[in-house]
Amino acid sequence: MLVWVVVDGWGSVRRTADGVTPTDIGAKTAVVVPAGWEVSGTRIGKDTVDVSTPDGVLTATLRIVPAEPTVGYAEAWDAAPPAQFRTEILASGLAVVHGLDGRRFVAAVGAEGSTVLVDAQAVQDLSGYLPALAELLEGIRVS
């Protein structure tokens, strides 16, 4: 398997995820990005990782927010969050609050006081990408 790594001028590392190796988001938080996705590693000075699907249709930013998942989720929307949202417990035991509004999907994954906000957007309808987003959410690790 050949993996390309490129370092840009802003200190981020671009690579193709192998679906196994965790990508650090912050000091105590990481995500195992699904295989084949492009990862723009943690930006210097920011607890942020950008990812995109192999076809480039879906892009997502994962960042740490100092809030409970429900609070982080509500604050992520520029306006009021969609009326319909779900709260679930992932296999990892972390709570997730998520909602979909057209071509934007927002989820907050975490535990008390430590949350990873996932803000995903697509150039087309997101419904076909929900399984991929679920895999991305299941890959989040907070310690």
Image (cartoon, rainbow, N blue to C red):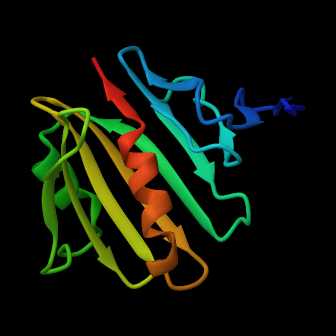
Figure quadrant of the C terminus = top left
Residue 4 point in image, percent of width and height = 87, 33
For residue 114, above or below residue 58? above
Q: Which residue is at a point 57% across and 44% down the rendered structure image?
A: 34
For residue 50, above or below residue 46? below
| Near-viewer residue (26 or 21) | 21
For residue 124, above or below residue 16? below
Q: Is residue 10 left or right of residue 60?
A: right
Residue 128 point in image, percent of width and height = 51, 77
Residue 12 falls in image quadrant? top right
Q: Which residue is at a point 58% across and 84% down the rendered structure image?
A: 124
Figure quadrant of the N terminus = top right
Q: How many marks?
A: 0
Q: Which residue is at a point 61% across and 80% down the rendered structure image?
A: 123
Residue 76 point in image, percent of width and height = 28, 58
Q: In this view, does 60 lie to the left or right of 138?
A: right
Q: In this view, does 137 lie to the left or right of 89?
A: right
Residue 67 falls in image quadrant? top left
Residue 60 point in image, percent of width and height = 52, 56
Q: In this view, does 141 lie to the left or right of 54?
A: left
Q: Which residue is at a point 59% across and 66% down the rendered structure image?
A: 58
